[in-house]
Image (cartoon, rainbow, N blue to C red):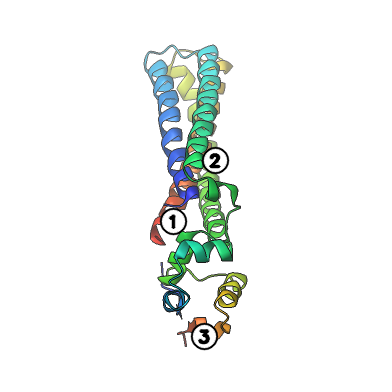
Amino acid sequence: MAYREKVQWASLAIGLIVWGLYFGRFAASLANGQPTPENALGGFVSAVILLVVLQVAAIIAIAIHRPSEAELPADPREREIEGRAAIAGYMVLCVAIFAVILATPLLTISGPAALGQPGGAAAAMLVGNALLAALIFASIVHSVWQIVLYRRQA
Amino acid sequence: MATPPITNQIRTLRFLTGEMTQAELGDRVGVTRQTIAAIEQGKYSPTLETAFRIAHIFRKPLEEVFQWQGD
């Protein structure tokens, strides 16, 4: 397995775990009816720090195992795979953002009302997390599509 | 993914060039071993530059290394 494919596998696994934990906690706070902006923001910052630390550690570990490949720039096939996956990720991001726009009334009016917090903070948390979910979903599609393209040519 | 209508003689040429490995060829061309493997198996069509580099290493004209099988 090529260095860049390994990096994609690691990135995908770490992203799924970290964001899975973050959204799991956020969903639990919604289920309890007690989501607070402080907790949501704290969870987000913790998730980003954890993500960066784990990804850097994983990339260093892979690079130590394959130092010769890690030093080389991506070859034309790898650049083509990255480009095609970026197009897929971008298309998914556009659709997901459009879905968030359509769901805005639900996220800003019905959702906060159901939580018993009709104020702007709950609406901001729901919209912010919906946009974050859209970004992460597009990022996951980007990684998965790269892995699929690598596997097809393996 | 459709198979590209291009065949190649890379495997044979590697064998005839002192049993050069895919990794060695990849190093000399500037691509990964996996990319050489994908080209050899016809799963990926190389860029024109990569194709010329491969042909240059085997000291063969391009058409002796790659053959177009399309219409």
Q: Locate residue B15, reporting x and y percent.
A: 42, 75
The residue closer to the viewer here, B58 or A26, is B58
Foreground mark, 1 or 2, reads: 1
Which residue is at a point 50% across and 13% down the rendered structure image?
A39
- In-image side of A138 versus A27 (left or right): right
Q: Farthest residue to the bottom: give it.
A: B71
Q: Locate residue B30, reporting x and y percent.
A: 58, 62
The type of residue carrying mark 3 is Glu
The type of residue carrying mark 1 is Tyr
Q: Locate residue B18, reporting x and y percent.
A: 46, 73
What residue is pinned by disc 1? A150
Foreground mark, 3 or 1, reads: 3
The number of callouts visible is 3
What residue is pinned by disc 2? A97
**Residue B5 seen from this side:** no
Callout 1 secondary element: helix
Residue A111 position (above or below residue B50)? above
Residue A99 position (above or below residue A1)? above
Callout 3 secondary element: helix
Nearer-N-terminus badge (1/2): 2
Asked if both marks, 2 and 3, belong to the same chain, the answer given is no
Q: Farthest residue to the front: give it.
A: B18
Q: Which mark is residue B64?
A: 3
What is the chain identity of the residue bearing mark 1?
A
Callout 2 secondary element: helix
Give the CA separation, mark 2 to mark 3.
Answer: 50 Å
